[in-house]
Amino acid sequence: MFDESWETALFVVSCILVGIFVLSVLSNLYSKYLYKKWLSNPATPLNVDEFVDITKNPPNYRYIACLQRMSVGHRKPSNDTVKLSSVESPFMKGLKVTQRTEPRNVSGKSISLDAKPVTIGKDDSPLIIGTIRMGFGHHRIAYAACSWALSEFVNTPTTYFHDLLNVDSEEADLIKDTDAMYSKMSRITSNIGGPFEALWGKMMLKGDADMLRISGLTAVHLRPLFKDLPKDTPIVATHCYVALAAVACGFTNVVNLVIDNHPQWFVVVPGCLNLVQGPANYQSFLRMGVKAENVQMAGHWVPKDIVVNIPEDCARRSARAAAGFGGNVKKFNPRRILIPVGGAGAQRKFIIQFIRGLRPLIHEGKVQLFLNAGDHVHMKESFLQVLKEIEMDSKYDTVTTLAGVEEFQHNLLAGKEPTKNITLFAFEDYFPAVATTDILSRVTDILACKPSELAFYPVPKLMIRRVGGHEQYSAIRAAELGDGTLEAREVEDALNNINLMVNKKELLVHMNEMIIKHAISGVYDGCKNAVKIALEMASKDK
């Protein structure tokens, strides 16, 4: 009886294993069939497999098919063309912002647009700064590129800010769904911490060849947002989806700005020139197999106003840092600390604990806080709550308009001190939330931020806890340049750095000296170089 039972069990297990094996083979064959189908329909010049070298980076067909279904469902790429018009930017003089020309009917309701149709064609010789409003980073870099395009070059063509989310369309809806999931996961994992944050960080590091394949397949769905433009239009892309979609459409002058300092296949794009901010990334991409003609080092992505004022701003910061050390403590200047919140609003827990830790320095008058809650209502409420906890709820000012931010900066540049030790910046609109950090970067002593796109700014930086494992490498770049600290993973580490910056002068003075040194060698000229390269590429096609 025992032998018969054992034989029966072995037979059942064997059948199960054979069934699993057969299902695995069949699912892999079906996934491969789907991948080949998606590649060929519609046909596109975007060739990821050749770019990553399929022999060295073979596709994981089931992984690709699964994530692609999660990303786009059963949507099929459209052959339609979304007709584009433009309006004047309400924020940057001379900048045109693209939008849909014809209203889109959604559920039978017509969406009204403030459309002023214009011809975006060869006669206009447009320059497209393409981006996607996913968090603040991509948008910030796009506006930085615009700041150079609008004022630096002779006979610069009309500059268009092409935010794919601003063009009302099914394609924009697809991007919004993806962004909502990313932002939610960033907030949850950052606030929970521990193994959840570690797992999310590991996922953010998995930007392998398969992730680029998935991005390429998704980008094909975005082609209608580019088909209304001439194929030789120079495009400066600050999001890889923008560059992928443009290449998929057959555009020939595409420049992709790689956003951080971690080399992944996911952030580079076939069929265009990928520009990186530093030498480590440049070397790493070459080692990965990116061809030399597809990658080039350009410098950091920084707005023009910050770059051209580096000598003046750093000299003023150094003088503020040194005052009071040498006998006359009455001349001590409180350290201005700018704390911005990222677009996903994922740093609440760390930042609130950090502010609690700054309480003694705030009450002693040694620290002034510039708190940029952006357009996050939950962050504004959290800031107000912690100010009450540290007994500063009646001792702060609030700025809610972009004009107010500009006036605040003007007063500080003129030598005036803030009226209160804490200033809270909070907005209802998106652009002031992004622009405020750029504007205040010129007048702050310390920028306390996660190692995101701001890690490359020419401002003394306290790098606080990252959101996603890929960001740690940007902090390393800042520390090696000497214009920022290594990442402070714990609040205690961040406070130790602040105490060093407040109670001594050497670190802040050194950081400002390093910024001036690197500015001379062009380290912060990345956006200027990107626009120049894109225009030169297009001029050769004429």
Image (spheres, rainbow, N blue to C red):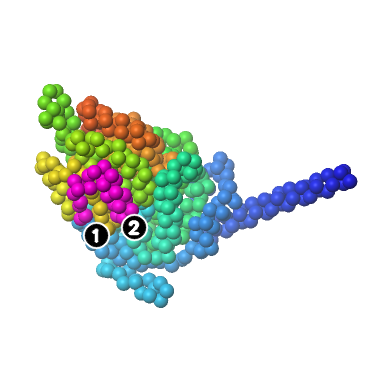
How many C-alpha atoms fall within 10 Å of the one at disc 2: few (<14), some, or many (≥20)?
Answer: many
Q: Residue at x 12, y 30 (%)?
A: 331
Q: In this view, does 434 lie to the left or right of 196?
A: left
Kind of element beneath mark 2: strand
Task: Pick the residue in front: 76 or 452.
Answer: 452
Q: Position of residue 81 (x, y in %)?
A: 40, 66
Task: Pick the residue in front: 25 or 476.
Answer: 476
Q: Which residue is drawn at 27% across and 50% down?
A: 384
Task: Pick the residue in front: 72 or 517.
Answer: 72
Q: Which residue is drawn at 30% across and 52% down?
A: 381
Extreme-right residue of the structure: 1
Q: Which residue is drawn at 59% across and 57% down?
A: 34
Task: Pick the residue in front: 156 or 371.
Answer: 371
- Residue 316, picture quadrant: top left
Residue 257 located within the stretch drawn in magenta: no
Q: Is residue 294 left or right of residue 305?
A: right
> Which disc is residue 89 wearing?
1
Q: What residue type is labelled 1?
A: Ser
The residue wearing badge 2 is 163
- Magenta residues, as a range? 374-401
Please tell me which of labels 1 and 2 falls first in the chain. 1
Q: What residue type is labelled 2?
A: Asp
